[in-house]
Amino acid sequence: MSLKKLGFAALFSLAALPALAQTQTLRIGATPGPHAQILEAVKPIAAKKGLDIKIVEFSDYVVPNEALSSGELEANSFQHQPYLDNQKENRGYKIETVAQTVNFPIGIYSKKHKSFDALPNGASIAIPNDPTNGGRALLLLQDKGVIKLKDGVGFKPTILDITENTKKLKFTEIDAAQAPRVLDDVDAAVINTNYATQAGLDPVKDALTREDPKGPYVNVIAVRAEDKDKPWVKTLVEAYRSPEVKKFVDEKFKGAVLTSW
């Protein structure tokens, strides 16, 4: 066979091969600590499925939804459903949950007291200043019997909804990310797990008490409503909720973070 014929044969063979699937880049927003660390574990699994995950870290809870809504991200993974619902109600975001991920039972921490029962009358308690996490903190304190809230307050009670405060606790509302930094200044602080671990606290060993992990605060992957049925969403969810990622979470966080699958 001539070189010319060989060339045509080679071209024909290449043309007969199926086109290589293109890798799709996904920018996913997350807060530093466990959320970002878990996404790092998702990356190699997603890569095998044709997804190139770029993790974009945010230091607060407000900007990731704005960035997703405006198209700066394809997805985010940092919030629980009550928080997302509140953001959608207040800001009009067209963002939808596509999967549950992990749960970070919120806890109460102290540098001054060794147990929850040791909190004195008039103790100063720092709680998050956003509606859902602040409400979550108050619901935890109600569950532990030190305050009572109005009936029917749902997931977003405020300190104005406290009807009984037997220990006369004094509340200070602060940005959730700042909670670990005020432990020297208060008797106790209610701290989200991702910020606790980022500050070197061990939620299993250091928390005076934690919320029931089977509550409504399982975290979620969120995308724009227009994207929720796109094929890459299903692929991302499969990569996240894989046995490899579950094993990583169990071994890395040792009970501080709990998988939902």
Image (cartoon, rainbow, N blue to C red):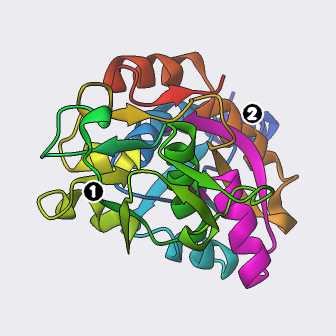
- Residue at disc 2, secondary structure: helix
Q: Quadrant of residue 93?
A: bottom right
Q: Report if residue 244 lies within the magenta region.
A: no
**What residue did someone put label 2 on?**
13
Please tell me which residue lies in front, 39 or 149. 149
Residue drawn at (24%, 36%) of the image: 118
Q: Amino acid at mark 1?
A: Ala
- Tell me which corner region of the image, top left, top right, bottom left or bottom right, holds residue 99: top right
Mark 1 residue crowding within 10 angstroms, few (<14) / some (14–19) / many (20+): some
Q: Position of residue 10 (x, y in %)?
A: 68, 36
Is 99 a magenta residue? yes
Which of the 4 image quarters holds residue 227?
A: bottom right
Q: Is residue 160 above or below residue 255?
A: below
Range of magenta residues = 76-104
Between 127 and 95, the one lying in front of the other is 127
Q: What residue sits right under mark 1 in the picture?
A: 123
Quarter of the picture containing the C terminus is top right
Q: Position of residue 109 (x, y in %)?
A: 27, 44
Disc 1, SS = loop
Mark 2–mark 1 distance (CA, rounded to whole Å):
77 Å
Q: Amino acid at mark 2?
A: Ser
The mark nearer the N terminus, 2 or 1, is 2
